[in-house]
């Protein structure tokens, strides 16, 4: 008898209610009358899950049977945000579910609010991975996202006396209805030990004799496409001890030692490293990287690949996309599997590997380019180090063949660097191994090719390419901004959510005064909603009639939150000194959201300064009703979804050449905020698309930055030469924001005056001038709204669906599974 595939519950209000109550009773073991908020949330989430389940099982089956080319996205981070609303939208059940809950006397908003967001990423890189898997599911492309199920995600930020305090993010304490553990599919992952060489019927081979291992337990998560009946899989690995208790040790009386080995293993997936763009070179971090990549590759061979698959055809079956260098240790691991386990010879294995990997670089900062000391790598993964050496030897032979014995060039291109200690340059390894190498915005890709890796570009013509980042319009327009979504649909019909270039059709509506009025009232409603959210969350109020000027992103000197602070202090100083009448400036509320890496002292000082400026400005009656500074703690995806739709002005003010792309910039433009920004990252493309009239550009271009740096940049000269800048810095230095204590912010002041690596002072005057233009433009509300609509209409390019199409066409050569 053929078993019928599982059928979901009936897609009716009645069917939903029944399934919800069933889940409440049978999964949670409570009646509705006694259900806690968490019980209700769980039962509700499980009901949504039940509707997606049949599709998920069907997709899993089809992908196994079809054996077509699939994308294995390898990423150490997935910054997912809340799942409930997204999965509800994907299943098309929102209205049925809302009515069903109302019938049970439950407000669906309370259910939404009960979800703890999984913060398994630091910022842009992790959020990009989440957008990409959403798009792949929506496009029906077979994909598995592989990563780590951190027990603790990005820390929860609180402020004490204006200073950042980090709290553990225990997102799993209440459990998660979205995960499916599969202990039966656990993979052992080995570490340490040594290698042996032996003769295998005339072929010299190596084998790795590891010293210890851990178990990787997979947890599956649904990745539903947008109302297309498709569900892909995100598979995150959790570490456990192989022998959960060493009974011999236990019986010998050493209980603590027996438990120690277990704790040791579980440490590997315990916590997300909170550094964004500044890797720390810690051993545990390398363990994490190898842990998830080795488990994923093994999982692919064991569970995704047909048992009789001809390995020579692997490049037609799979592409492993490396999300920055964090998973690059997968390259020697893949080689090790092909050589030592599948017994391929070196040339065969290397030819396959070079077609099965591609590498995305997300940075230009030299300190963000990951290196691992040979000493550490050799201790933890001796066989992999051997393989890396051989890859490097053969690579340098090929370079020598092309360019002769050019020692300088060889040293510059070697995967192994000798200074300051012998180490492996992971970006070089990824570039040598990858079929393609891409940057994440036009400018970034160009600088990567011409400035960071020019020798590689010369050696591998055609390997370097660009794929400009994108964002999913499902989460960041439809869910975050339902008012705008409805307005768009009213104007241009449905279909734009999966074909975002169709937003172009709104250009005509920008000329319609009634549409502008409707658009402005959506923005006003979003501001009121934000006010409600911040009031409950932080006790803040957002004043009516204020321009909302928003800067949300990780705190990093290159992103230049400091420049924003100088602008605020400049405005504040000009009023309290009496040079400008408060009534002459455009009322603004400045909103910051930013976490600093716990060990990044300067970033934490800047957070302290923002809060300090905020308390002085917000308490000063002389600027009341005119200037306000809000810094809600713990900026995360959930808060982004509230802030971005309410913003008028988007701050994208990094030093040109430092921000690889940015993706917040795209979210703001698509929600009708105007950008004030430098010519950096994807700002370049945003400005080109929305037009100069609808974008406030300022600051040095990347070549100008380089030229000034080469001439010898002296920030003190800018301080001396600009009275308004001097006043702002002097006010900070005077202790005005630190109760008279000049020492508190002295390190910030002297850093600005005598170092200023990211040239804040050099861009100050053009920034202030651009802000004056912003003020003037905002005074004409109708013209501002017109420009905001054009930002929406012309930003359709920044859908992550388009990014995925670019990867598919130019890098992966994969296809949707029909
Ligand atoms: C982290 C560690 C090492 C190297 C790079 C990073 C990194 C880069 N983390 N986040 N990024 C950001 O990635 C985003 C997505 O591509 C970009 O938009 C953004 O500019 C990067 O800073």
Image (tube, grey):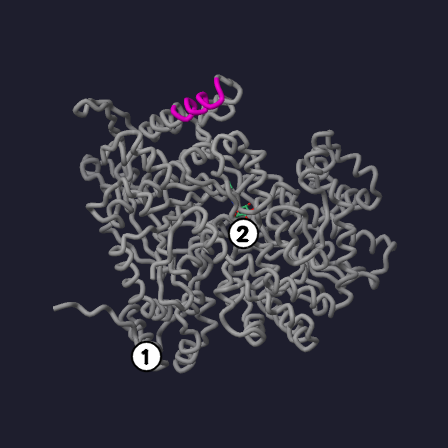
| Quarter of image, res 58 | bottom left
Q: Quadrant of residue 354?
A: top left
Indicate whether residue 510 is drawn in magenta.
no
* Label disc, if present, on residue 15 of the rendered structure: 1
Q: Quadrant of the C terminus?
A: bottom left
Graded by Cα atoms within 10 Å as few (under 14), some (14 to 19) or many (20 or more), the crowding at tag 2 reads: many
Residue pictured at 40% horizontal, 48% vertical: 812
Image height of 113 relative to 301, above or below: below
* Residue occupied by mark 2: 157
Asked if residue 267 can be seen in this view, the reply is: no
- In this rendered view, identify the residue nearer to me: 643 or 348: 348
| 99 shown above or below 46 | below
Q: Residue furthest right?
A: 579
The magenta region covers 394-404
The image shows residue 145 at horizontal and vertical percentages of 38, 51
Could you say whether the residue bearing mark 2 is in a helix, strand or loop? strand
Residue 162 screen position, x and y as percent: 63, 50
The secondary element bearing badge 1 is classed as helix
In-front residue for pair 96/616: 96
Main secondary structure type of the part rendered in magenta: helix
Which circle's residue, 2 or 1, is located before the other in the chain? Answer: 1
Q: Residue 24: where, in percent of width, then height?
A: 32, 72
Q: CA distance from mark 2 to mark 1?
A: 41 Å
Location of residue 319 in the rendering, given as x and y in whole percent from the top left corner: 37, 45
């Amino acid at each position: 008898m053929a078993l019928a595939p599982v059928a979901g519950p009936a897609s009716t209000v009645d069917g939903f209610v029944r399934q919800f109550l069933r889940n409440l009773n049978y999964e949670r073991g409570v009646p509705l009358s006694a259900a806690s908020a968490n019980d209700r949330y769980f039962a509700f989430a499980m009901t949504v899950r039940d509707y997606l389940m049949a599709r998920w099982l069907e997709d899993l089956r089809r992908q196994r049977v079809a054996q077509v080319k699939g994308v294995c996205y390898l990423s150490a981070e997935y910054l997912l945000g809340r799942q409930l609303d997204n999965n509800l939208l994907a299943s098309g059940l929102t209205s049925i579910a809302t009515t069903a809950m109302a019938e049970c006397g439950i407000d669906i908003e309370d259910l939404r609010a009960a979800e703890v967001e999984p913060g398994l990423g630091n910022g842009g890189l992790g959020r990009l991975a989440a957008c990409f898997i959403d798009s792949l599911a929506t496009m029906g492309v077979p994909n598995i996202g592989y990563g780590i199920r951190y027990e603790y995600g990005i820390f929860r930020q609180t402020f004490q006396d204006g200073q950042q305090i980090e709290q553990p993010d225990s997102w799993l304490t209440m459990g998660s209805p979205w995960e499916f553990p599969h202990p039966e599919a656990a993979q052992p992952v080995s570490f340490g030990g040594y290698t042996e060489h032996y003769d295998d019927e005339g072929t010299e081979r190596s084998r790795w004799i590891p010293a210890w291992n851990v178990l990787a337990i997979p947890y599956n998560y649904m990745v539903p496409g947008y109302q297309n009946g498709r569900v892909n899989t995100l598979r995150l690995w959790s570490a456990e001890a192989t022998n959960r208790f060493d009974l011999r040790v236990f019986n010998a009386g050493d209980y603590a030692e027996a438990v120690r080995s277990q704790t040791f293993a579980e440490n590997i997936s315990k916590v997300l490293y909170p550094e964004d763009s500044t890797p720390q070179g810690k051993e545990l971090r390398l363990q994490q990287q190898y842990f998830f990549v080795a488990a994923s590759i093994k999982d692919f061979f064991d569970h995704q690949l047909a048992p009789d698959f001809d390995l020579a055809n692997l490049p037609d079956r799979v592409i492993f996309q490396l999300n920055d260098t964090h998973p690059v240790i997968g390259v020697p691991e893949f080689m090790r599997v092909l050589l030592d386990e599948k017994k391929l010879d070196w040339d065969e294995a290397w030819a396959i590997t070079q077609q099965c990997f591609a590498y995305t670089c997300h940075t230009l900062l030299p300190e963000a380019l990951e290196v691992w000391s040979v000493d550490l790598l050799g201790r933890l993964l001796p066989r992999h180090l051997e393989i890396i050496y051989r890859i490097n030897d053969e690579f340098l032979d090929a370079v020598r063949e092309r360019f002769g014995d050019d020692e300088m060039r060889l040293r510059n291109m070697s995967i192994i660097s000798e200074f300051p200690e012998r180490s492996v340059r992971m970006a070089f390894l990824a570039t040598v191994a990858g079929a393609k190498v891409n940057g994440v915005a036009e400018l970034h890709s160009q600088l990567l090719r011409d400035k960071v890796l020019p020798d590689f570009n010369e050696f591998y013509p055609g390997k370097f390419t660009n794929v400009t980042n994108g964002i999913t319009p499902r989460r960041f327009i439809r869910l975050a901004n339902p008012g705008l979504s409805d307005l768009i649909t009213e104007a241009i019909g449905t279909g734009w959510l999966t074909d975002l270039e169709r937003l172009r059709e709104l250009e005509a509506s920008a000329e319609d005064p009634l549409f502008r009025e409707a658009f402005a009232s959506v923005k006003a409603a979003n501001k009121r909603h934000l006010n409600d959210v911040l009031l409950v969350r932080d006790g803040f109020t957002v004043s009516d009639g204020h321009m909302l000027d928003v800067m949300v992103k990780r705190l990093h000197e290159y992103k230049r939150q400091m420049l924003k602070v100088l602008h605020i202090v400049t405005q504040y100083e000009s009023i309290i000194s009496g040079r400008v009448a408060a009534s002459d400036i455009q009322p603004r509320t400045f909103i910051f959201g930013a976490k600093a890496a716990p060990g990044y002292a300067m970033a934490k000082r800047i957070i302290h300064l923002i809060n300090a400026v905020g308390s002085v400005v917000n308490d000063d009656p002389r600027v009341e009703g005119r200037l306000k500074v809000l810094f809600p703690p713990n900026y995360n995806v959930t808060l982004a979804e509230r802030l971005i739709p309410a913003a008028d002005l988007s701050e994208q003010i990094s030093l040109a050449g430092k921000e690889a792309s940015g993706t917040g910039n795209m979210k703001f433009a698509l929600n009708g905020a105007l950008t004030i920004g430098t010519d950096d990252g994807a700002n370049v493309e945003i400005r080109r698309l929305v037009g100069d009239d609808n974008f406030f550009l300022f600051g040095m271009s990347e070549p100008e930055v380089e030229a000034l740096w080469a001439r010898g940049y002296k920030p003190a000269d800018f301080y001396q030469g600009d009275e308004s800048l001097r006043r702002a810095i002097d006010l900070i230095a005077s202790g005005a924001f630190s109760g008279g204590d000049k020492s508190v912010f002295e390190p910030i002041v002297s850093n600005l005056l005598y170092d200023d690596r990211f040239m804040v002072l050099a861009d100050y005057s053009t920034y202030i001038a651009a802000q004056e233009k912003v003020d003037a433009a905002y005074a004409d509300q109708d013209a501002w709204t017109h420009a905001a609509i054009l930002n929406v209409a012309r930003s359709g390019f920044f859908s992550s669906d388009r990014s995925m199409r670019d990867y598919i066409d130019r890098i992966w050569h994969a296809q949707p599974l029909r």
